[in-house]
Amino acid sequence: MYKGTNASSGIGIGTAVIVEEAELVITREMVADAEAEVERFKGALQRTMDETEALAADLAQRVGEKEAEIMNGHLMLLMDPMLTGEVEGVIRSEGVCGEHAIGQVFDMYAGVFASMDDELMQQRATDMRDLKTRLQRVLLGVASTDIASLPAGSILVARDLTPSMTAGINPANVAGIVTELGGKTSHSAILARALEIPAVVAVEGFLSQVSGGDQVVLDGDAGVVYVNPDETVAAEYQAKREAFLKEKKELEQYIGKPTVTKDGVSVELVANIGKPEDVERVLAYDGEGVGLFRTEFLFMDRDSMPTEQEQFEAYKTVAEKLEGKPVIIRTLDIGGDKEIPYMGLKKDENPFLGYRAIRLCLDRKDDIYRPQLRALLRASAYGNIKIMIPMVTCLDELRAAKALIGDIKKELDAENIPYNREIQVGIMVETAAASLMADLFAKEADFFSIGTNDLTQYTLSVDRGNEKISYLYSTFHPAVLRSIRHIIACGREAGIMVGMCGEAASDPMMIPLLLAFGLNEFSMSASALLRSRKMITNYSIQELQAVADKALSFSTTGEVEAYMKEFLG
Ligand code: PEP
Ligand code: MG
């Protein structure tokens, strides 16, 4: 078994096809007529641009506009006069052939990007190498690997799939993707997810372990790959794959159905997103809105802060696409495990207890918080946006955020800029302090969303990312269960909506308890929506009260978990 990074969900079973872009042999040929060679280069450039444009149009139609942007990015590079001018300059000054000049210039840029310690820059290096090879192929008249016409059941194995290769993939034929390089946010991973092809990336040294024709099994959720697995493993994954596909198909019947319990209680079933383009999947899986937009992702994978205008456009896009359905947008939650290099933050000794989220935002109102809140208020004119404050531990923080929002509203009034005057401002309840004071917070917050990922780590003093102590990290610990029940009760008592956007909201063992506690809104990854709707519609809240009472009567995590497993059968 080989371990890598889980990049796209699902089980892939099939035959390895090694996609190796055979190294083109480029020699440093001298040319007699440099101007004629420049013209030859320009011809190849134009053909490559035409091809790229066609790929972008095909992607836009088959997959989505956002995915097509990757190819449009390539097009922009090809149209960059600085870059192509440098190639022409090398041809003219050194009198060398176009193939060599392309290699020299594109390799130089790829090298610079590759040496930078940043995933986005690494991606640019891949883009540069991809374009280099494509331009050289056109000049040499060499065809590239035809990924579009692979046999059905192919598992693509490559050192790194270039975006143009991934763009040509036909999901009907490709059962999975394994690469040695790349990360969760590499373009190939993004495209694999958009095409719903299971993928595992960053499997170190994988190419030396596999040959074309080998049987490969990959688990895109667990991030593991097997080569020529024995019968037991093969059968296990075959069964997993069938169950995955069968469930996916069966769940389609829940699209368009309301999320109502057997005894007639409606709850909201909404999704967590990180980028505007994630909305496509929310709509595809019939999400009733967005319960958590983690805005920090807009700030990642780039070299500078997104401007107020860029943020406004992102928030507006989401609000408009959801056509009046609720969209809870969380203000920036960085620090802790999420770093943003260009912000120049010092490493905290104790990051999860440190300079994070609302603490940081209130300290950097001018360059961070104000622009974000202004963007949010401006976007609120275009849909049903609500603002959510993360990691609150005291009322002063909520009050300070609300005061700032009040100031910005006055500014917008003075500038005649429209916004929703009644915009709701709620909090993430994810610290022990917020939970213990939930009754007080409920008087000043318009809604609660329970962040169990953090609430669990802060309640149990267990770092959520530390493997060594992960056995202690459980939302079924009696202390966490009591905390959740208490928060929901306080919110309901005050008449405000209480949702949950931590991972526990889609945990099948937790859903019955949350229903019994009276949770109003469940927010989760889009792929979990339909399964959760199925569960919720099969329960009667009345019947679940006894289950919740029993679960809360135990003294240890193990007992609670065992009971809930038994209850689910
Ligand atoms: C949480 O803490 O439960 C949560 C939803 O936020 P994040 O995982 O982004 O900290
Ligand atoms: Mg959190």
Image (tube, rainbow, N blue to C red):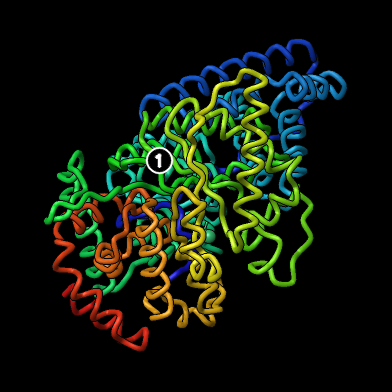
| Local SS, label 1 | helix
Total numbered labels: 1
Q: Quadrant of the C terminus?
A: bottom left
Q: Is residue 306 left or right of residue 3?
A: right
Q: Residue at x 18, y 69 (%)?
A: 544
Q: Amino acid at mark 1?
A: Ala
Residue 520: percent from left, percent from top = 31, 54
Q: Is residue 343 left or right of residue 461?
A: right
Tell me if mark 1 has few (under 14), some (14-19) or many (20+) residues whose alpha carbon lies within 10 angstroms of its own: some
Q: Is residue 114 above or below residue 91?
A: below
Residue 458 lies in what quarter of the image?
bottom right
Q: Residue at x 60, y 32 (%)?
A: 375
Q: Is residue 22 left or right of residue 171?
A: right
Q: Nearer the viewer, residue 42 or 308?
A: 308
CB of mark 1 near ligand 1 (< 8 Å): no
**Residue that protrudes farthest toward the bottom in the picture:** 555
Residue 372: percent from left, percent from top = 63, 38
Residue 340: percent from left, percent from top = 69, 51
Residue 412: percent from left, percent from top = 64, 25
Q: Nearer the viewer, residue 537 or 424?
A: 424
**Residue 219 seen in the figure:** yes
Residue topped by disc 1: 194
**Residue 220 seen in the figure:** no
Q: Is residue 357 above or below residue 567?
A: above
Q: Residue at x 70, y 39 (%)?
A: 305
Q: Residue at x 34, y 37 (%)?
A: 170
Q: Quadrant of the N terminus?
A: bottom left
